[in-house]
Amino acid sequence: MAAVETERIGRVCAAICLLSVCSLCRGHTQDRQVLIELNPGSPSPPPGDLLHARAVGDNDTLHFLFCSQGAPTLLLVHTNTSFSTVKVNWTQFNNRTHSGGLTVEPESSILYSTAVVFNRLLEYDDVNDTADPTSDLFPPYDLQDFRWSRLNLSGLTALLCGNTAASSNGSLCLQLSLFETEGRGQHWPRLLHTANSSQLRVWLDGVLPRATRSRFLLELQSVGGASPLSRVEVHRSIDDEFTPSIFKVSQWTSALNNSSDVLGFVQWKPVAYRQADPALEDAAPCRHSEPRPQSGEAVAAVSGLIRAFYKEPEATGLNVSFGLAGDPFYNSTKFLSWTLLVGVGSPPVDSFSPLVIGMMAVGLGTPMILLLLGGICVCTRKRAVATAYEPIN
Ligand SMILES: *[C@@H]1O[C@H](CO)[C@@H](O)[C@H](O)[C@H]1NC(C)=O
Ligand SMILES: *[C@@H]1O[C@H](CO)[C@@H](O)[C@H](O)[C@H]1NC(C)=O
Ligand SMILES: *[C@@H]1O[C@H](CO)[C@@H](O)[C@H](O)[C@H]1NC(C)=O
Ligand SMILES: *[C@@H]1O[C@H](CO)[C@@H](O)[C@H](O)[C@H]1NC(C)=O
Ligand SMILES: *[C@@H]1O[C@H](CO)[C@@H](O)[C@H](O)[C@H]1NC(C)=O
Ligand SMILES: *[C@@H]1O[C@H](CO)[C@@H](O)[C@H](O)[C@H]1NC(C)=O
Ligand SMILES: *[C@@H]1O[C@H](CO)[C@@H](O)[C@H](O)[C@H]1NC(C)=O
Ligand SMILES: *[C@@H]1O[C@H](CO)[C@@H](O)[C@H](O)[C@H]1NC(C)=O
């Protein structure tokens, strides 16, 4: 009887815990106001679209620029005023020969900038199923040579798809999502985002493999004025609630000398999916190579946005490979999707969700309360027995 009662009390406590945690999470107001424009000020449609999103905060602005002139590129510029603007000199921008085609004004308001260039798609024939991407490489697909579609805007997302004659009817797509508040993606890996970040989902759909046992790699480059992203850290977590079976998150960050202040980041979970609407068995683990310095001039030559914005770009690059030894080959579904977050400041950190906290409260709380009540019971009984014998004395 008492046990049933205390168990009920435990449940009520857990419910109260859960409710208070929930109320803490709720009530998020807009952190930034996001306004999107396409090809700002261009007299005619340029050879590749340029998206500009202004994400205005209280005292600062984040400019997101996404462009398909050359290799697809996302550029973030953080300024310390809410009235900074982007100016494009379209003749110069489309020429792609000199820097200065795109400027952020006033220049003195720029706090930080970082860019990610999607440079190449690599394919290799994994004859022995070792998932070692250094041998049997096919000629790479240079993404600057793809025929890119116009940008398809819908709300705060933009979709870009492209292909080459060589890749046949399949396509490589990039979907950019911008955010006004903190939240979590709807689809796996359900990355946590803030208004200081944007999400890119990259997928390959129907590109014909050049071998039955083909696997793919994506080569990314990070560009910055002074401090490009230089190191990748892998953090572990004990909670896989949002990305089933994945207990790691990788963060490619910039570090100013040896200070711990992170200025910008690219974050991802080391998993890709072999279906658009994946089940658990469609997860393909990913690996990354160590970031290596790249020629800034070479990166500016492949990306119109890097050429236009940076005078002296500094760049690093890394490869992300999809699938480990023993995993099904690309040919099994001819589909592969991978998601990353690009932002300024510190990367979002996954914390325990209210559900997990509630479960821990019930799991740990109930026995504790039982012990406590048991202890009190025993004490009061002893006292009662003791007092019962006192009169004899
Ligand atoms: C923005 O700047 C104003 C004036 O400098 C200051 O009063 C306000 O606290 C700042 N707001 C935030 C969120 O930093
Ligand atoms: C923005 O930064 C520039 C350069 O660092 C500085 O001169 C200016 O005072 C800053 N403005 C504000 C509002 O903090
Ligand atoms: C695959 O295995 C065979 C036999 O062990 C070996 O001769 C060949 O070099 C291997 N190929 C690769 C690409 O490792
Ligand atoms: C590409 O699509 C066209 C028309 O849909 C079709 O005729 C052609 O066979 C396809 N090519 C390949 C390589 O699948
Ligand atoms: C976003 O960046 C601004 C400016 O650096 C900072 O004040 C704010 O705390 C950041 N928000 C989050 C959720 O990281
Ligand atoms: C892909 O797999 C199918 C059977 O599942 C096979 O017929 C086809 O030849 C394979 N494609 C390549 C490029 O090997
Ligand atoms: C790194 O940190 C140490 C101590 O914090 C400092 O003495 C040193 O100058 C720093 N080095 C650089 C390159 O900032
Ligand atoms: C990516 O992998 C390819 C093939 O192994 C290699 O040639 C290239 O240098 C790698 N890129 C980077 C940035 O490490």
Image (spheres, rainbow, N blue to C red):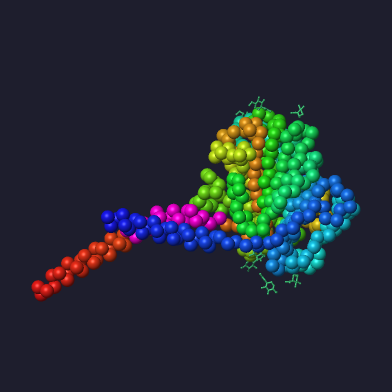
Q: Is residue 1 magenta?
A: no
Residue appearing at x 23%, y 67% in the figure: 380
Residue 79 in view in this figure: yes
The quadrant holding residue 102 is bottom right
Taking the image as four quarters, which one is ligand 5 found in? bottom right
Name the foreground residue: 15 vs 304: 15
Task: Pinpoint residue 69: horizontal percent, then vertical percent.
Answer: 81, 47
Question: Residues in magenta?
Answer: 350-370
Magenta residue check for 360: yes
Nearest to the observer: residue 118 or residue 23: 23
The one of 381 and 231 positioned closer to us in this rendering? 381
Circle count: 0
Q: Quadrant of residue 79?
A: bottom right
Residue 104 location (% of width, % of height): 80, 62
Left or right of residue 107: residue 130:
left
Counting from the top left corner in percent of width and height, residue 291 is at 67, 50
Q: In this rendering, would 110 be left or right of 357?
A: right
Q: Identify the residue at the far left of this view.
A: 392
37 relative to 324, above or below: below
The quadrant of the picture occupied by the C terminus is bottom left
Asked if residue 323 lies left or right of residue 40, the reply is: left
- Residue drawn at x 63%, y 52% is 267
State whether residue 294 appears in this view: no
In x, y percent, where is residue 284? 59, 40
**For this rendering, which residue is in front, 174 or 258?**
174
Vertical side of 76 occupied by 337: above or below? above
Kindly report the secondary structure that dominates the magenta region of the rendered protein.
helix
- Quadrant in which the N terminus is drawn: bottom left
Specify the quadrant of the image occupied by residue 224. Answer: bottom right
Q: Measuring 49% from the left and 51% from the top, which residue is drawn there?
A: 238
Left or right: where 133 falls relative to 149: left
Which residue occupies 60% across, 46% down? 187
